[in-house]
Image: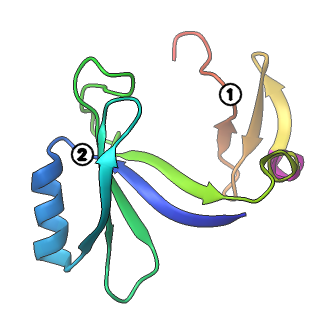
Amino acid sequence: MYFTYTGIRVRNLERARRFYRDALGMRVVNRGRMDAGGLFVHLKSPESSQVLELNWYPPRTRFHEPYANGSELDHLAFWCRDVRADFGRLLGKIWSRVVGGAPASADADGEEQDIGPPRRGE
């Protein structure tokens, strides 16, 4: 398993693309439409192998949500050859207990991280 890219939510895809191009010198390496209806742009810096994915989700699509401070991080992407084996290995390393019927774990800083669906009221 290895880390491949970071996806962030943006409110205006073109404005965000211009910012990363003009301010940071990043270049578009891929763009497209998601099955869920959103649009994405992949950017890279010339000297880096890391990819930044800008994600825009239009209203009334599955992943759209009103903007809230702190909601920009959309996802961290990891690729693996054997999903079941890597998932089992990962759970074996981080699963510490069950909270409210869902597995819970601690990250590298000891902060609780939930695995699975949100609990009621979240």
Figure check: 54 above or below 27: above
The location of residue 80, given as percent across then percent down, is: 72, 59
Q: Amino acid at mark 2?
A: Val
Q: Residue furthest top?
A: 120
Instruction: Look at the numbered disc 2 and give the secondary structure of its residue.
Output: loop
**Cα–Cα gap, marks 2 and 1:** 25 Å
Q: Position of residue 1 (x, y in %)?
A: 73, 63
At label 1, the amino acid type is Gly
Give the residue displayed 60% in from the left and 65% down from the top: 3
Residue 118 sits in which quadrant? top right
Which image quadrant for residue 95?
top right
Residue 9 to residue 81: above or below: above
Q: Residues within 10 Å of mark 2 (few under 14, many from 20)?
A: many
Numbered range of the magenta stretch: 89-94
Confirm whether the magenta stretch covers residue 11.
no
Q: Is any atom of residue 41 visible in this view?
A: no
Q: Give the x, y percent position of residue 106.
A: 73, 46
Q: Nearer the viewer, residue 57 or 102?
A: 57
